[in-house]
Image: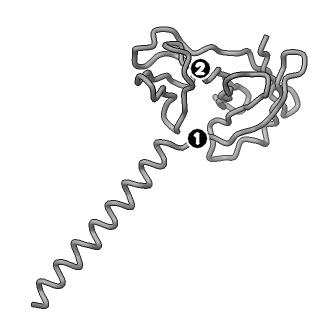
């Protein structure tokens, strides 16, 4: 009887651990970046480099004048890519995790330069020119 109890308890612990790992993996896959609110002035949005934490490769920039967020991706210490978070397939919002940008509506996937990885989208995400000056990243949305 003790052996049976031990096996049952061990299986319960293993299943709990596996469920925990699955939840953590799922949460990582659905993770979104930090949201930075900033307003456009003269068709430019400014974001401080300090908004990026060491473990983050991107932040989401939200401006009230835009219908969609902008994903600002840190390519290197001096280079950033700004992408409009609007799917080119049916104009739905796209989301990002640590691996890719994806459209939950129809399954399109994009890399962090905005290039299509998986259809049905056939056009890359809209990109904006960025410039780094004195620890401030400027996104030109004109």
Instruction: Tell me which residue sits at (54%, 44%) in the image.
Output: 31
Q: Quadrant of the N terminus?
A: bottom left
Circle 2 sits on which residue? 86
Farthest residue in the bottom direction?
A: 2
Instruction: Tell me which residue sits at (78%, 28%) in the image.
Output: 63
Per the image, label 1 sits on a secondary structure element best described as loop
Per the image, label 2 sits on a secondary structure element best described as loop
State whether residue 137 is above or below residue 89. below
State whether residue 34 is above or below residue 101. below
Say which label, 2 or 1, has the lower sequence index: 1
Location of residue 76 in the rendering, given as x and y in whole percent from the top left corner: 66, 30
Location of residue 113 in the rendering, given as x and y in whole percent from the top left corner: 57, 20
Of residues 95 and 127, the one nearer the viewer is 95
Q: Quadrant of the C terminus?
A: top right
Determine whether, in the image, residue 87 is placed left or right of residue 34.
Answer: left
Residue 106, picture quadrant: top left
User: What mark, if any, has residue 32 been given in the picture?
Assistant: 1
Instruction: Tell me which residue sits at (42%, 48%) in the image.
Output: 26
Residue 60, picture quadrant: top right
Residue 69, picture quadrant: top right
């Amino acid at each position: 009887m003790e052996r049976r109890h031990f096996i049952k308890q061990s299986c319960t612990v293993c299943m709990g651990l596996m469920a925990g790992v699955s939840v953590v993996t799922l949460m990582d896959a659905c993770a979104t970046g930090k949201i930075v609110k900033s307003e456009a002035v003269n068709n430019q949005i400014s974001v401080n480099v300090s908004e990026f934490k060491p473990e983050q490769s991107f932040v989401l920039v939200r401006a009230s004048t835009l219908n969609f967020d902008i994903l600002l991706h840190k390519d290197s210490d001096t280079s950033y890519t700004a992408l409009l978070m609007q799917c080119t397939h049916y104009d739905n919002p796209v989301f990002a995790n640590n691996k890719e940008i994806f459209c939950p509506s129809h399954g399109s996937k994009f890399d962090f330069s905005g290039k299509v990885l998986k259809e049905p989208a056939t056009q890359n995400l809209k990109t904006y020119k960025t410039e780094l000056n004195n620890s401030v990243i400027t996104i030109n949305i004109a």
